[in-house]
Amino acid sequence: MWLNKKQLNDSAIREYRQTLKQVTPNYLVIDGLFDETILDKVVDILQQPQHWTTQKHTYAALYVDDKQWQEANDQQRFVQRDVWQRSAIHSADLNLKHLESTNIALNFLNYLRSNEFMSVLSEIFTVRLTDKNVADPLINTNYFRLGSNDFVSEHADDSPGREVCMLLYLNKDWSNSAGGELVFSGKHNEPIYISPLYNRCVLFDPASKGSEHWVKSLNNEFNHQFRYNVTSWYWSE
């Protein structure tokens, strides 16, 4: 239901494994990994403004409040973006079409933490991924959006036991001139740029060399739109 199985046959898995060994950082770009009929419904609900709230991180502390944010200097601020709020879902406020999409959006997040999907990632990365020791798995998989005033500055996602990071982009008809590319620092500080195209999945090993990354800001002429994605982190035992 959720996956495009053509992208996950035996030969594709072998090719993914080989690619991971050959590139720095260890990353994959898989286009069309998910069923787009489902993603279309997800995008429909993500465009509803009532589900979003601003999230701010500094290098010193995550999820800071406004006071901490104002006290931090520009060099300490590394994330300003919107995060999707599951708790903001009120079925009474939605028509039938949006209620269906909302349920699919929630179910899709749950699927990304399912044993089925983690087994796919485990096979690609040849490591056993599990939420066995993750206190609150759901906070490690969610939708995010960036506007023209938002930013994700350079940072690393490595932490003990974290084996795989996944980014899935949900931007239909994205213009390459809009900005918003994911940028890996890469080998010998030669950056790698990846456009956030619709149904493009980026998987990477956050402990691999050159995996530090950031997001290019949206260009000012695109201040009427957002850049949407799912971010998901996975651990081994």
Image: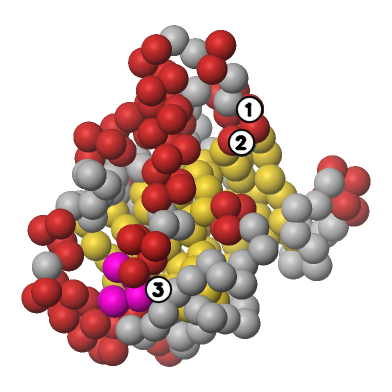
Horizontal and vertical percent position of residue 137: 58, 58
Residue occupying the point 28% across, 89% down: 21
Residue occupying the point 68% across, 45% down: 55
List the residue tagged with mark 2. Answer: 85
Relative horizontal placement of residue 5, taking residue 127 as reference (left or right): left
Kind of element beneath mark 3: strand
List the residue tagged with mark 1. Answer: 88
> Which disc number belongs to residue 204?
3
Q: Nearer the viewer, mark 3 or mark 2?
A: 2
- The disc, 1 or 3, on the residue closer to the chain's N-terminal end is 1
Q: Main secondary structure of the magenta part?
A: helix
**Identity, as a three-letter code, of the amino acid under mark 3:** Phe
Can residue 194 be seen in this snapshot? no
- The disc, 3 or 2, on the residue closer to the chain's N-terminal end is 2
Q: Quadrant of the C terminus?
A: bottom right
Reply yes or no: does residue 131 show up in magenta: no
Residue occupying the point 50% across, 23% down: 48
**Identity, as a three-letter code, of the amino acid under mark 2:** Gln
Horizontal and vertical percent position of residue 219: 46, 43
Kind of element beneath mark 1: helix
CA separation, marks 1 and 2? 5 Å
Q: Which residues are magenta?
A: 120-124
Q: Quadrant of the N terminus?
A: top left
**Identity, as a three-letter code, of the amino acid under mark 1:** Ala
Can residue 122 be seen in this snapshot? yes
Horizontal and vertical percent position of residue 92: 56, 11
Q: Which image quadrant is residue 15 in?
A: bottom left
Q: Nearer the viewer, mark 1 or mark 3?
A: 1
Whether 193 is drawn above or below 85: the answer is below
- Is the C-beta separation of discs 1 and 3 under 8 Å? no
CA separation, marks 1 and 3? 31 Å
Category of crowding for the residue at label 1, using alpha-carbon neighbours closer than 10 angstroms: few (below 14), some (14–19), many (at least 20): few
